[in-house]
Amino acid sequence: MAGSVDVGLGFTIDAKISVNGSYQYKVHNSHWQVFYITASDTYVNVR
């Protein structure tokens, strides 16, 4: 893990990508900083 985010923070999802068979979301925040986060339902709640 390279980092973490606090519960309740929101990001805009730009894409859902496959990396070595696992999915990640490419997201950005209000400052247009881009992050890649796991798409696992165990860790991420998409609303």
Image (cartoon, grey):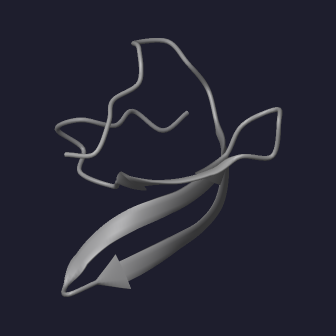
Residue found at the far bottom of this picture = 20
Q: Quadrant of residue 31?
A: top right
Q: Nearer the viewer, residue 36 or 24?
A: 36
Numbered circles on residues, count: 0
Q: Nearer the viewer, residue 43 or 35?
A: 35
Quarter containing the C terminus: top right
Residue found at the far front of this picture = 2
Residue 28 in picture, x, y percent from top left: 69, 47
Q: Quadrant of residue 12?
A: top right
10 w.r.t. 19: above or below: above
14 w.r.t. 40: above or below: below
Residue drawn at x 48%, y 38% as measured from the top left: 46
23 w.r.t. 32: above or below: below
4 w.r.t. 33: above or below: above
Residue 38 in picture, x, y percent from top left: 31, 53
Residue 13 in picture, x, y percent from top left: 64, 53
Residue drawn at x 31%, y 70% as measured from the top left: 23
Left or right: 20, with 33 as reference point: left
Residue drawn at x 41%, y 24% as measured from the top left: 5
Q: Nearer the viewer, residue 3 or 44?
A: 3
Residue drawn at x 16%, y 38% as measured from the top left: 42
Left or right: 9, with 11 as reference point: left
Residue 16 in picture, x, y percent from top left: 50, 70
Left or right: 16, with 42 as reference point: right
